[in-house]
Image (cartoon, coloured by chain):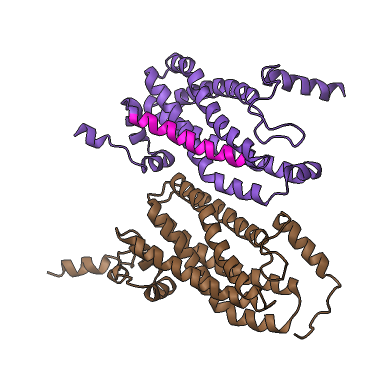
Chain colours: A purple, B brown
Amino acid sequence: MQAQSEKLNLGEIGVLLRGETESIAAWAERWNAQRFAFHVGVILLGAGLYGAAMGWWRDPQQAAYVAIKFPLIILLTTLGNALLNGMLAPLLGLNLPFRQSFSAILMSFAIASAILGAFSPLLAFVVWNAPPISQAALQGATYNFIKLTNVAVIAFAGTTGNVRLFQLLARLGGNLAVARRVLFAWLVGNLFLGSQLSWILRPFIGSPNLPVEFFRVTALHGNFYENIFQSLQQIFNH
Amino acid sequence: MNEPNSLASQIPPIIPSAPGQPGDDPLERAPIPNAVVAIEAILRHPRRVMFQLRQPNAGKLIAAMLFVSIVCSLIYGVVVGTFSGGTQLWAAPVKIAGGLVISALICLPSLYIFTCLSGSQARLVEVCGLLAGLLMLTTILLIGFAPVAWVFSQSTESLAWMGTLHLIFWFIATVFGLRFLETGFSHSNARSHVGFHTWAIIFLLVMLQMTTALRPILGTSDTFLPTQKQFFGTHWADCLKAQDGAQQPGTGR
């Protein structure tokens, strides 16, 4: 009977998106390898499709690369911070087992990826209608429009995933202040690692003046924060 | 002895409540066996369509509504094609029907996402059905506008004027279609309509861009599809510039 009630179906993505915390909390409490695989599958498919649409503007090969890199960043961020996030939750007042905190974060990324996947046909349509990247790069407006579209969609997906994660943490901990603290700590850690992973795995949209490649030759030269610091230095020394 | 009557006189009359869920009224549960009944139902009793979309065998109704949408858009496309004639008589209907279906397919995943995020309990089949209803209502209304559009297309040579007229007709028809979709959306326990309104803007923008992506629909060209990629704002500005001063208003045809 237990096995019957634990059967997975595609409708579960609707439960995640609606933020039905009762069901989601129950999922987080009981480890289920099939459900774990389902959430990883949603991340691979959703973020992969969005990545493909993003890279397609430069070249179909770039689309294939970004379809791999985009879900990879999400999964590596989740794995890389799993231990830290699992330790931070009890330290900040939410006594979650390691697996539960890992499941909760994975589910929030699955929500964000499902949203990204749903927007991938729209982004593909925008890219299909855009002039070629070489010409557009010179004009500027199209390049900026596509960049801003990507920022808006990714920000929306990320925010929604975190809102649902916050609702889940509040349900699990029964305390809004604790949920806020834990979410903030997790966000800081994930943003810190995620930004650097994105820096290493660049390019995403690609540049018309540079070759299509999985990694830049300079992938491991410097880091995201050094680059930001250098940009700020240039602004203030100008 | 008089007490019950006096009490009754003090109780305010029952005010009929606002319509609840589709199917509360027995009339709304009447089956929709074919496309003709579906057309009548969506115009007169849209809640009947909404109720049927929640039933297990909704697939047949969805297919019927899509069929009507394609047929109606092909007919309206022929009217659009009469402006230029020639190859546009078949190219315009194909592009309009194809563009409508492709736009719906592009926007369907995001509609489902926004529906879920709003807390709605609608299943994917119901969302597909509501979208098919939007397309059917929009294209039926376009058929209603078709005679007016045809009369104008025979009496003017101005591409800009005809383009604007078709856009106005399309916009009015789509607003009614969106209103049907929103009513269906509100009956599925959605907590907020913000997501729906955002999606409606996305849908309108996709359809507007589709008119540019599949150009020429109204005018003529050597190729079936454009060779140069453009966004609709730029394309329309170019059209208006090209038209400006090149044609005397009111010339016969």
Say if residue B41 shows up in the picture.
yes
Q: Position of residue A120 (x, y in %)?
A: 56, 44
Nearer the observer, B24 or B246: B246
Say if residue A25 shows up in the picture.
no
Residue A27 drawn in magenta: no
> Where's the N terminus of chain A, which quadrant?
top left
Residue A49 drawn in magenta: yes
In the image, residue B133 sits, relative to residue A129, either above or below, namely: below
Residue A87 is drawn in which quadrant?
top left
Lateral position of residue B185 relative to residue B240, left or right: left
What residue do we see at 77% from left, 65% from top?
B239
Q: Position of residue A198 (x, y in %)?
A: 62, 26
Residue B50 is drawn in which quadrant?
bottom left
Of helix, strand and loop, which mostly describes the magenta segment?
Answer: helix
What residue do we see at 63% from left, 28% from top?
A214
> Which stretch is magenta?
A34-54
> Where's the C terminus of chain A, which quadrant?
top right
Nearer the observer, A233 or B249: B249
In the image, residue B205 sits, relative to residue B252, either above or below, namely: above
Q: Position of residue B56 (x, y in %)?
A: 29, 58
Nearer the observer, A18 or B147: B147
What residue do we see at 70% from left, 49% from top?
A130
